[in-house]
Amino acid sequence: MKKWMVMAALFSMFILVSCQTKEQNARMNENTEESEKIWEDPTEESESTGENTSGMKEESKKAEEKTTGQEMSSSHSVVNYDEISNKKYAWWFKRNDTHGQPEAQQEIDIEQYDAWYVATGETKKVVYLTFDCGYENGFTPVMLDALKKHKAKAVFFITKHFAKDAKDIVKRMKEEGHYVGNHTANHPDLTALDTRSVKMEIKECEEAMKENTGYEMDPFFRPPKGEYSERVLKIAQDMGYKTLFWSMAYLDYDVNSQPGKEYVIDHYKKYIHPGAIPLIHNVSESNAQALDQVLSDLEAAGYSFGDPAQIGSGKESTGK
């Protein structure tokens, strides 16, 4: 009887221990599962956050596309370029033979956009030389030689094509102290493009300059063919550019119908004026033949060659 009672007691203890063990195991499993849940949650949250971030990026992209024309200007104010007039103008000026600064378009005040066609208010005999370079026609090196001889500084407005195909000439321009300005990538009518496309035309020309020459584009802009709008001028200004039109020009860009060396020389003698910004096309054989003499005649008439960076700064009368 005692033996049976001992065995029963031992059996009861075995059952108790077994139950306790199962309970402990169950609790450990619960704790393990809870612990796994705690570690799973951050992962799930992270994945969810990733999806949300992607969605936010997509929404941001859509919002950017919807507000293409609304960005921060250089003065840190929000500008909606689509609200700025895109009425097209073509640059014009009226010559006079009194050696006075010519009249020009008066439809809008271009100076509010840091745009200039002459050094306004200039009274001293200073001229600011500018060249348009759509492509190379074999004459630019001759013009650079003349500028170097007379120690005259100039702005060369180039396209993406010129930066790529005439990169050694562009490098020479920079090495000899000249400015290289932006004439857009593909020489389009900018008033026919939307805001994004206008910016891309300017940006691609900048990138071509850097990629092919190693030099940064200088902060001067000239709209192709002199076609512009207030919106175009504002975009250029907010991208850090000073826009330069011109107060002297003649039909020198048609390579098959050149005006001749003497015509170019006489044109400067007749129409030069203080603060002049001549437009000179690099493809012109007549310009290449005449430039050295033109610069000599200007010096003989008391003119000096100014730094275009000073136009509009109030320091125009410091020609060198």
Image: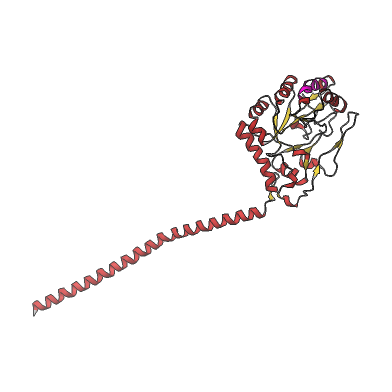
Quadrant of residue 240 within the rendered picture: top right
Q: Can I make out residue 103 in this image?
A: yes
Q: Can I make out residue 223 in this image?
A: no
Above or below, 197 relative to 24: above
Query: Residue 134: horizontal and vertical position, in percent?
Result: 71, 34
Question: How many dots with numbers?
Answer: 0
Residue 278 horizontal side relative to residue 134, left or right: right
Quadrant of residue 97 within the rendered picture: top right
Above or below, 140 relative to 161: above
Depth check: give the residue in front, 161 or 124.
161
Where's the N terminus, which quadrant? Answer: bottom left
Q: Main secondary structure of the magenta part?
A: helix
Query: Residue 57: horizontal and vertical position, in percent?
Result: 57, 54
Q: Residue furthest front?
A: 256
Residues shaded magenta: 288-297
Residue 239 horizontal side relative to residue 21, left or right: right
Query: Residue 186: horizontal and vertical position, in percent?
Result: 69, 39
What residue is drawn where x is 63% and y is 38%?
Answer: 207
Is residue 292 on the magenta stretch?
A: yes
Is residue 187 on the magenta stretch?
A: no
Depth check: give the residue in front, 70 or 316.
70
What residue is drawn where x is 77% and y is 33%?
Answer: 311
Judging from the image, the colouring scheme is secondary structure
Query: Residue 132: horizontal and vertical position, in percent?
Result: 74, 32
Q: Residue furthest bottom?
A: 1
Where's the C terminus, which quadrant? Answer: top right
Depth check: give the residue in front, 286 or 203.
286
